């Protein structure tokens, strides 16, 4: 059975490692310690071989044109390291370091855009599930839809708390409040599915739709830049 991959987590990990290796290369650029220099260069070579392999995977989230550019960079990095080795000049090593830094930034931006799209879709899907369950007056489906929606908002709240999240504090605060509201109302509704407050369900549905629309609009703005 094929191993399941989380493409976003993989891209985040690669971006983080690229940053670390960029710093490692920068640190040894002017060093006379040949062993330390060889170690940093060798680690960077192995990283780019792994990135090249990752790009080929069908679950890779990167756009095709970026994949092609990364292939070219991987070949450039491999050629430079294998042809020069520890004989690389300070400028050669700094060039490799700069490549890592720039690609890391690009991958992080791609991850953010994909997360926004993923969250927007999930919010929309949960809103539709809640609406369908309510219309059918199906307690079992409503309970499942409410639970899925609450889990999604717990996830969104966790993302908002992350140190990597650069959203304004006001938006983070609003997301926290919305997540707490959803959790509180879900618990209240769950205690009495025989007498559900329809207006509360509609408020939760509208909240999802509004946030989903906002995320989609933000993504479209990013694509236009």
Image (spheres, rainbow, N blue to C red):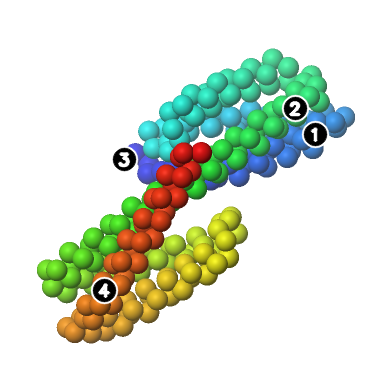
Viewer-closest of 113 and 140:
113
- The residue carrying mark 2 is 93
Of marks 3 and 4, the one in the foreground: 4
What percent of the width, then of the height, locates residue 167?
55, 58
Does label 1 or label 4 sit earlier along the sequence? 1
Q: Which residue is mark 4?
A: 201
* Tag in front: 3 or 1: 1
Label 1 with label 4: CB-CB less than 8 Å: no
Measured Cα–Cα span from mark 3 to mark 4:
40 Å
User: Residue 28, labelled with which disc?
Assistant: 1
Name the disc covering residue 1, or none. Answer: 3
- Verify CB contact (< 8 Å) between mark 2 and mark 4: no
Left/right placement of residue 125 relative to residue 135 reads: right
Residue at point 37% right, 79% down?
184
Mark 4 crowdedness (10 Å alpha carbons): few <14, some 14-19, many ≥20 = many
From the image, state whether disc 1 or disc 4 is nearer to you: 4
Q: CA distance from mark 3 to mark 1?
A: 43 Å
Residue in front for this viewpoint, 206 or 186: 206
Residue 104 image-quadrant placement: top right
From the viewer's side, name the closer residue of 66 and 77: 66
Of the two numbered discs 3 and 1 on the same chain, state the one appearing first in sequence: 3
Residue occupying image coordinates x 80% and y 34%: 28
Q: Secondary structure at mark 3?
A: loop
- The answer to which of marks 3 and 4 sits earlier in the sequence is 3
Q: CA distance from mark 2 to mark 4?
A: 58 Å
């Amino acid at each position: 059975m094929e191993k399941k991959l989380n493409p976003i987590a993989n891209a985040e990990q690669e971006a983080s490692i690229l940053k670390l290796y960029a710093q490692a290369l920068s640190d040894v650029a002017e060093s006379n310690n040949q062993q330390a220099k060889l170690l940093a260069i060798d680690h960077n070579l192995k990283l780019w071989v792994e990135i090249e392999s990752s790009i080929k995977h069908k679950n890779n989230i990167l756009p095709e044109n970026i994949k092609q550019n990364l292939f070219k960079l991987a070949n450039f990095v491999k050629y430079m390291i294998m042809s020069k080795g520890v004989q690389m000049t300070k400028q050669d090593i700094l060039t490799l370091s700069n490549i890592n830094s720039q690609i890391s930034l690009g991958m992080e931006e791609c991850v953010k855009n994909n997360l926004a799209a993923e969250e927007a879709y999930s919010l929309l899907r949960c809103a539709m599930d809640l609406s369908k369950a309510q219309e059918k007056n199906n307690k079992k489906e409503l309970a499942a839809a409410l639970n899925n929606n609450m889990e999604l908002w717990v996830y969104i709240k966790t993302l908002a708390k992350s140190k990597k999240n650069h959203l304004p504090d006001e938006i983070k605060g609003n997301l926290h409040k919305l997540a707490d509201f959803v959790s509180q109302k879900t618990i209240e509704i769950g205690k009495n599915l025989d007498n559900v407050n329809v207006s509360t369900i509609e408020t939760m549905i509208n909240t999802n739709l509004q946030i989903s629309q906002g995320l989609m609009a933000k993504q479209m703005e990013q694509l236009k830049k």
